[in-house]
Image: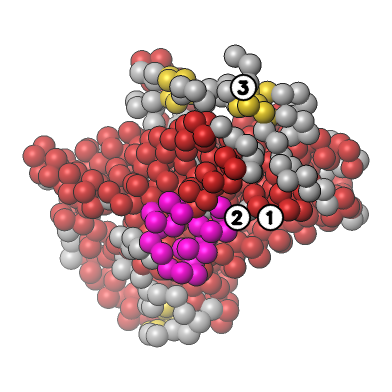
Amino acid sequence: MAPVWLQNYDPLGGMAVSTLLAGVPVVVMLAALGVFHIRAHLAALLGILCAMLIAVTVYAMPLQLALASAAFGGLNGLFPIGWIVLNILFMYRMAEESGSLALLQRAIGGITPDRRLQLLLIAFSLGAFFEGAAGFGTPVAVTAALLISLRFTPLAASGLSLLANTAPVAFGALGTPVLTLAKVHGYDALAVTAMIGRQLPVFSLLVPFWLIWAFAGRRAMWEVWPAIAVCGAAFAIPQFLVSNFVGPELVDIVAAVCSIAALVGFLRLWRPKTVWLKAGLSFEAESTAEHGPAAGQAAASVATASRSDLFRAWAPWLILVLLVFVWGQPALKAALNELLAPKFPFALLDGAIGKVPPVVAEPTGIAAVYTLNLLSATGSAILLAALLGGAVLGFGPLAMLRVYLENLWALRTSLLTIILMVGLGTLTHFSGMDSTLGLAFAASGAFYPFFGTLMGWLGVALTGSDTASNVLFGGMQKVAAEQLGLSANLMGAANSSGGVMGKMIDAQSIVVASTATRWVGHEGTILRFVLPHSIALAALVGVWVTLQAYVWPFTRMVVG
């Protein structure tokens, strides 16, 4: 089917003005959230209405295509993203109602009562495992829920889970972002994987320090620097080795397991001089205690519980880890999709819109096929884990049904927000507004390594997915790099590496975090906290890529 409408990336005849206009819908939504404190679903609605107006009146997009684009995005927001959030919080509510979360809190306190080290273990190391196994919102939903169960404040639990979910994102969901980049845009998968593996390990070392500094302040961070260094190095070194000598699929899984094992083992041998007990964000401790008494209290609390009680407390989460990992295996996904994964070409939209040069070599229709992969979806694995975990916790079928319906009702506004947020991102993609912004970055000449990295950051911030950002801008990165005499692998990798720092500010991730922490209505507060960190880290990735592009000896790190 030939496209019936071709995108125009400079509808006003001047890229500067067209670029400013293309950014208006996102600015409106972010300002509504972060400046005017408008509730998230209303901010998303304002953003999507603004995008609709600009798409139809300025970009000359047919109204039926604009409406279909938003609806197509909304469906993808409901499933699979909303499906993940709904089921992880179903599991969380059962664990909370059964009292197992209180016991779990004491058990983790038995490993370390120090909030800084708990944060490292859960938000960074465990979150990286879930990113590698499932991606697509799972790590933030799980880690934020766990941190809330440990009585971290909602802002700390949500904001710090988002901040921690950065360095692993490029290899999330068993390497899906990298494999998609290679498949769609013709990169050598192993070469671009190796290049990402020469960019991100630096930030895998940096982010744990940054995370604890953001939580507790510089002085409190230096008190636990040995543990932070062990945690980061145990992730960064395997990340480099696996990406450069094996491939993209298991980078995060192997690195996360190494990080968890190294940190837990190290904490058996080393203890900080003081214990940070504050559960909120601050640059000064509200309460610290000498390590011995605090550790003794936590250990005694765990010791009073029977082994069977401890097993029941851990069982739902262990089942979750196992099933999410198994569900992520390509062979099982393929088998489940053969059983049930109907595809629905979206009426009026599938192939009806064409991308044009210079974004692509020749006019190419954009596919719009909705896949209802109910069996293979990560949210389905989480639902099964919740049902099995609920049975272990003593819930019968009727009790589970009651909790599920209560959970569904409680999340109605959050699910609507996710639908609207993803609808906005999809509309900007199908209208060509996102490509207008990308082309503006690509025109930066000698500064392209820096701004090309920010293009990846922008792509993830707009779409909520490193995979989507690679699909969106991977081709432009390759063309621009070749025109400027740069390595295509360098800039393809930069798109993914820069993109990971946009993950913490994308609207759907913020909604997932606020929902998981039951802090709905405070999305603007979360955005204001994470935005400076996102910009600063993205800029640092841009500087690192620029060094690799132009400055010896960093240029020797470039693959191809």
Residue at the image position 83 percent from the left and 52 percent from the top: 444
Q: Answer yes or no: do the residues labelled 1 and 3 have beta carbons within 8 Å?
A: no
Residue 308 screen position, x and y as percent: 17, 50
* Quarter of the image where the N terminus is located: top right
- Chain part drawn in magenta: 24-46
Q: Answer yes or no: do the residues labelled 1 and 2 have beta carbons within 8 Å?
A: yes
Q: What element carries label 2?
A: helix
Q: What amino acid type should be assigned to the residue bearing mark 2?
A: Val
Position of residue 558 relative to residue 540, above or below, is: above
Q: Is mark 3 on a helix, strand or loop?
A: loop
Position of residue 289 relative to residue 477, above or below, is: below
Q: What amino acid type should be assigned to the residue bearing mark 1?
A: Leu
Q: Which mark is residue 4?
A: 3
Q: Mark 2 points at which residue?
A: 24
Q: What amino acid type should be assigned to the residue bearing mark 3?
A: Val
Dot 1 or dot 3, earlier in sequence: 3
Residue 339 screen position, x and y as percent: 36, 15
